[in-house]
Amino acid sequence: MNILLEALVYGAIAALISGTVLPLLYRSKNTRKTSFGLSLLSSVLLLGFAGAILYTGKEPVFPAIRYLPGLDFTLAADRLAAGFVLLIAAVVPGVSIYSIEYVEHAKSEAGKNLQAALTNLFILAMLMVVLAGNMVIFLIFWEIMSISSLLLVLHDYSSEENKKAGFFYFIMTSLSTAFLFMGFISLFRLTGSAEFGPLEYPASILNLPFICLFIGFGIKAGIVPFHKWLPYAHPAAPSSISALMSGVMLKVAIYGFLRFLLSVYTLELWWGILILIGGSLSAVLGVIYALKESDIKRLLAYSSIENIGIIFLGIGLYVIFKVEGLETLAMLSLVGACFHAFNHALFKSLLFLCAGSVVHATGTRNIEAFGGLVKRMPRTAVFFMIGSVSIAALPPTNGFVSELMLFQAYFYSSALSDPLLKVLLIITLSVFALTSALAAALFVKLFGITFLALPRTKYAEDATEVPKFMLLGEAIPAILCILSGLFSAQILVMLGFDFEVPDMLILGLILIGACGLVWFAVRNSGPSGSPRISKETWGCGSLAQHPTMEYTSAGFSEPLVVIFKKVYRTEISSTRIYEDTKESIFKSGTARIHLMKFFEEILYTPIAGAVCLVSSNISKMQNGKLDTYVLYVFIAVLTLMIFTRFFA
Amino acid sequence: MNASFLLFTLLNTGFVLLISPLFMSLIKKVKAYTQGRKGPRLLQSYSDLRKLMQKEVVYSPNSSGIMRITPYLNLAVLLLATLFIPIVFIPEAPAGIGNIIVFLYLLAIERFFTALCGLDAGSTFGGMGSSRLMSLSAVIEPTMIIAFAALAYVLKTVNFHEMFAITAGSTIPESPTLALISISLFIIIIVETGRIPVDNPATHLELTMINEAMILEQSGKNLALIELAHAVKQTILMAVLINILAPWGLATELTFTGIVVSCLYFLVKASLLAGLIGLFESSIAKMRLFRLPGFYMMAFFFSALTILMEVFA
């Protein structure tokens, strides 16, 4: 068994490595195809690997390879890791098949090959992070993951916007690594080993590593207020990479965080509260910001922040229930959170791939320029619909099941003893409900404005359906979305989790049966024959319908923008000049609507300013003269001597 | 899937389908009386539906498949939702049928597709309706979840069937807190079925409308299906309130007399509730759109209060 597992995982790694190297050596369309074929192959192997571990519960540790003393190259996989390997294996096939044709739209031949190579490297790095047996390996591949994705974000480095996005992403991801380093080092000081666990220490000692890892993984996962890099980086990256980043990379951060949390023996209550509040805030703010957005990929990026928030919310519930000793509820929330991570990986990668097709077909990312695409890109529209329905959590799709599990955990929480904790749960529950309903509004808007009604611009009018490999790439996650939703109860039972989760398969069958019944009943009554197609949409007697009459994306979200105007922090300022002194005849004036970017203006800009101030002062010390530097060295040595004499 | 559940499916769904249009005209009748008019016949809704069923369907050339499948899907979803709310008797349901959250999200399916329908034909009114519907439903959602969470807190289950089994045993509301939840539930009915002060079901082409704006492009059979689905939704939401606040008469076992008594009891209680809704609608004016969140806050307050009472009691 173990040998088989080893063969599978090493085979997958070998496939990914050759997928990375091959396009760098030979520059041709066929090598690119082979490269994506190899990543497809690796995902098939990983599917077997993860499936076997999840099903049998065997937890293999692969033999360590020692290159340097103290640095073991160890791979290990338990059920948690296998779950996330499964997630990778579920997203990669769609992305790699999609990329075969998508990558051909890159400008230069070298760029195409580089993109294929980096995609493989990126997948490999994410896989290795999940399989990492100790913190050193984890960090090494974490950095490779960050750098390969950074290069992919910068694929079109000539554009000013992409440069800014890449820079932003670089800063944030470095910050994330810095915090992870701190967290891991403080853990290392405690345990004396680079292994992940188990951590049998009083939780109070673990407070520092917890905070560091929460921030470090939180930045990478994109929870508020560290979320700003997502809406920059996702639109800049190629769509297939956005799908991987949003679908898998954010989940790798979640995995790291869970790896830490699950190895801690005694959790602290305030950790749970912090995670829960952070998650709820991310969820609701993410979706509120998304509602205002009219760049399709940026909107999806904000929606990822929302879903990551929901996952963190589930993890927070897990910690709280665990501390309170409610094992069943803790497990329900944890599995709910993990299942939501898996589901989000599926539908978000699907949505990003479809968005990529739409952007490719129209040449713009602005939703306001779309419309009527359902007639021009019918297949993409169907896949997009499946993604929207799943992400809006409508039964019987997968997105619904994971949210249902979290809702159930909330609803049973009356077993908690602390009344104040219950109040906190009530507040976060209502926030969660609001999030979920806003997400439905968001995707009605996105689907409706993009695909329905008349095309608003020439770009949308001239759009045509994308080639078949791209469609196939979209079809795979779409089918997986449906299947993992319908068979959710069976899957959970198969994995050994016995929860009271409604059986979506039966509900789905009844729903289909009811649809058929209604159709049958209606068909046999009333006039027969095909329905009449009128010439116009009725517009109260207007002579012709024009696309400018349609509701726009901004118009659609207007009521919500007004209701949540406190959150958006819009500043409306106007000046008026009058003809007369009594201010009755209006002459001229200006009006300005300024949308405050809250976190940028309150949090990031001041910090950036402070950093600039400090560094400009430090740079004064650097005058380029040798004697000054000798003086510095002298002072440093002196200080060190005094320090070792008196303090150490 | 046992025989009693199969029988329940037929009886419960059939009963709801049969009586739903009645309450639509009943509310109109009550409203008409308060305004000093006579109003439509009690069976008017039935003949309206029959008339629409005889008419052909007209589609706009701009519209897509969404417009064609939504009427069928809506009614099917609501028929599925009727299985969650026992009215004739309480069966042994399989597969989590009766789960509160699934029920809420079934209603969300109907809302989602109706809103898409509004955008489909590209008319301004439809877009306006769906924008408003999705916005308002997002704001009411916390209230609905909290109200249902409060139910789950009080009755210690997340399944309607089990809840009703608990409440049906008693002659007065199981707990005084349930009376508080009922206020929220009543407001939820008003909001979900698009009644004054949220929406005005009696008007067309006014700037106030929400639901009617979205179905403006529907015609013939499709319109009939949508109207029927709307009526079914109203009936089952009313049934939730009735079974929580005044559950007596609901048969817990499968007997012939029990079913007949259940149906009669429900008919009487639901008629009273429909009358109440009609009176409520007549006594209040349509609110401005942006004042509605305040109205919803009231419902939120009552359900949050319930939970707090349960928590600190």
Image (cartoon, helix red, strand yellow):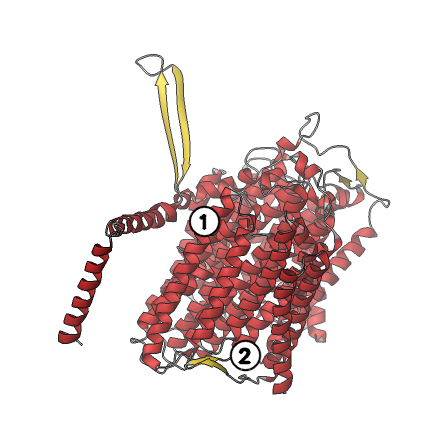
Q: Which residue is mark 2?
A: A79
Question: Which quadrant would the C terminus of chain A be assigned to in this image?
Answer: bottom left
Say if residue A629 shows up in the picture.
Answer: yes
Where is residue B293 drawn, in percent x and y?
A: 45, 45
Label 2 residue SS? helix
Total number of numbered discs in the rendering: 2
User: What whole-number distance in Å separates the C-alpha atoms at marks 2 and 1?
Assistant: 44 Å
Q: Is residue A201 left or right of residue A40?
A: left
Q: Specify the farthest residue to the top.
A: A580
Mark 1: give few (<14), some (14-19) or many (20+) Cα within 10 Å. many
Q: Which residue is mark 1?
A: B296
Where is residue B122 drawn, in percent x and y?
A: 66, 37
Occupied quadrant, residue A429: bottom left
Mark 2: give few (<14), some (14-19) or many (20+) Cα within 10 Å. many
Where is residue A589 drawn, in percent x and y?
A: 39, 21
Question: Which quadrant would the N terminus of chain A be assigned to in this image?
Answer: bottom right
Question: Label 2 sits on what residue type?
Answer: Arg
Question: Label 1 sits on what residue type?
Answer: Tyr
